Image: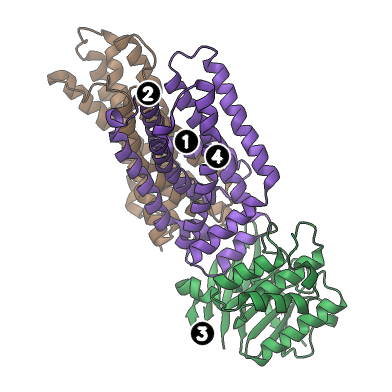
Amino acid sequence: MIALLVLAKDLKLHARDARFLATLALFALSLVLILSVAFGPLFQDPTREASATLWAALFFAGVLGLTRALDLETESGGGEALRLAGADPFLVYAGKAAANFLLLAALFVLLLPCAAVFFDVGSLSVAPGVAGVAALALIGYAAWGTLFAALARGLKARELLLSILLFPTLIPLWIGAVKLTRSLWAEGSIDPVRDWVKIMIVVDSMGIALAAWLYESIQEAEE
Amino acid sequence: MTSTMPSWWEKSRPFVWGMALVLIAASLWALLNAPVEAQMGIVQKIVYIHVPSAITTLVAFALTFAASILYLLTRSKIWDSIAASACEVEMVIATIVLVSGPLWARSAWNTWWTWEPRLTSFLILWILYGGYHVVRASVSAASRPTISSVLGIVLFVNLPIVWKSVEWWRGSLHPRSVSMTGDMRQVLLLSIAAWLVFFVAVWQERLRLERLRDEVESGGGTR
Amino acid sequence: MILAARDIRKRFEDRIVLRGASLELHPGEIVLLGGRNGSGKTTFARILATSLGPDAGTVTLDGRPVRQALRESRRSIGFSTHRPLLYLGLTPLENLEFFGKLAGVADAGSRATQLLSSFGLEEFAGTGMEHFSRGMLQRVSLSRALLPEPRVLVLDEPYAGLDEQGTQTLNALLLEAKGRGAATLLVSHDRERVPPGITRVCALRDGAIEAAG
């Protein structure tokens, strides 16, 4: 299946990009550190500050990950060959988005324990819930991020543009993620804020739907 | 494949300007003579600028959205010019919204910024559409129409979601709808009309410039 | 006739590169396209291979405009150019297998090994390509284009970076393609290295294609 082929290819490329991955991990950790320092040393509202730190760091590190994935495509024209292979653009998109999702998920798995430990919040019992929230947020991030990254390919200020376009678009996801995570950590359930799940699902679906409609046009736009 | 605006469009320009100037003069006069609101005093009159410019911005965004779709469907560059010129004019108007809002908020609620939903959503849109212009300026001429159209669609589609989210996020301080009676209502309606016509007038000029620039870029021929 | 370009026009920013270039490729043909540097050969090749869209004019495959069935048309065309069109983070074998499977080639792995062997790259088949020389990349790139045995081949300066061995291998493969009825457009100003089976020679001059001697 084409999407799986593209996914496997992207994962292989990332796996061999060890130097970049290590740098990205360090960058993400420094973000968490900076924010912890900004909020600390005595945390007024640990669950909220931890949640904010986790998701803020994840957003910015994620943009760098997305840009890197884009660069791996355009570097020596692999992406061009992919386009000219005549595969269904949406399936190609799906494979790429899935790979981006996994990359973001790896970042999340790295940052979650850090935030939990630095702020002394969270417990294993809510871990599945937090994982669910992360899945919701990161699916949307990957869906929209892959779409915008394709738009920004070849532009000099890729990361900046990606941030400018992505963050406002993802605000609903991010507010939801921060609130839901915090609720899980503070109260052990998402009940007070469960409406946000609906909005996040809408954002995720919208991203995928728009990609299905527009990805081919973006792909065919001349560089 | 039309690449020039129809003749009635060109002919209407002086009329539109005439009408705009008349309406502006009328609304200014009405504004100055409108009853002064009891609580807020004369500053309340900013609403006659704030509300109409906000409405005009949204109308213009919708225009950009529609023109973007039409470009992707017809691939006729005139739609891209329409979308981009509308978007540029309305960035300016959106700025006016963002400046007049806090001015009003200051005297109504004694604070410059309150994260209340509408203003926040407007700020987000302003950033997003700012990104639209940056991307538009950065891509190659060949891909510009396609990329801009995709953005024009994607950003507009986000509008309702972002709006709703920010509303949920922060309960609304912003008056649900501007309810006015009698004289004040007349002034407001007049202002809205003036702003809309003024927008069309300026937009016509901007569109003309955009078409001229496009012609020069494609070497003096229209396709 | 398999692939035909009619009255292709293309301009970039301020330069008109192609003004009404036309060419037809028939089964079993190897057409050599020459022309001075900057004459627009690469642009024309790209348009033919659907990598780029023309400003005016049409490219048809089996009589049908490629724009109407872009994906299908692309599956019948093999393209190589100056850029490697490869993923440097993957090995040659992985690259070829990936693109082969995408094209629906059943035994992509063995075909890939075969091609890499022919080009003398069997010992590098499983190595990362970051340190490959120009010539090595070129050979992998050509293998990528040839692997699915497409009906049309558009090769832009395929001999660049190739040594004697590589040139011979490429020419053998081109004659093989000719034998199975494929149509090939060879863009090259390297007249000495082309295979003996050239059916036609053309040149791009002033943005249009002329038959040359």
- Between A50 and B89, the one nearer to me in the picture: A50
The numbered mark, 4 or 2, whose residue comes first in the sequence reads 4
The label on residue A186 is 2
Q: Are marks 2 and 1 on the same chain?
A: yes
Q: Residue at x 80, y 70 (%)?
A: C123
Which colour is chain A painted?
purple
The three-letter amino acid code for the residue at tag 4 is Leu
The three-letter amino acid code for the residue at tag 3 is Asp
Q: Position of residue C159 (x, y in %)?
A: 79, 74
Give the chain of mark 2: A
Q: Position of residue B138 (x, y in %)?
A: 58, 44
Query: Marks 4/1: CA distance?
Result: 18 Å
Query: Marks 3/4: CA distance?
Result: 49 Å
Of tags 3 and 1, the one toward the viewer is: 1
The label on residue A167 is 1
Q: Are marks 3 and 4 on the same chain?
A: no
Q: Residue at x 41, y 64 (%)?
A: B1
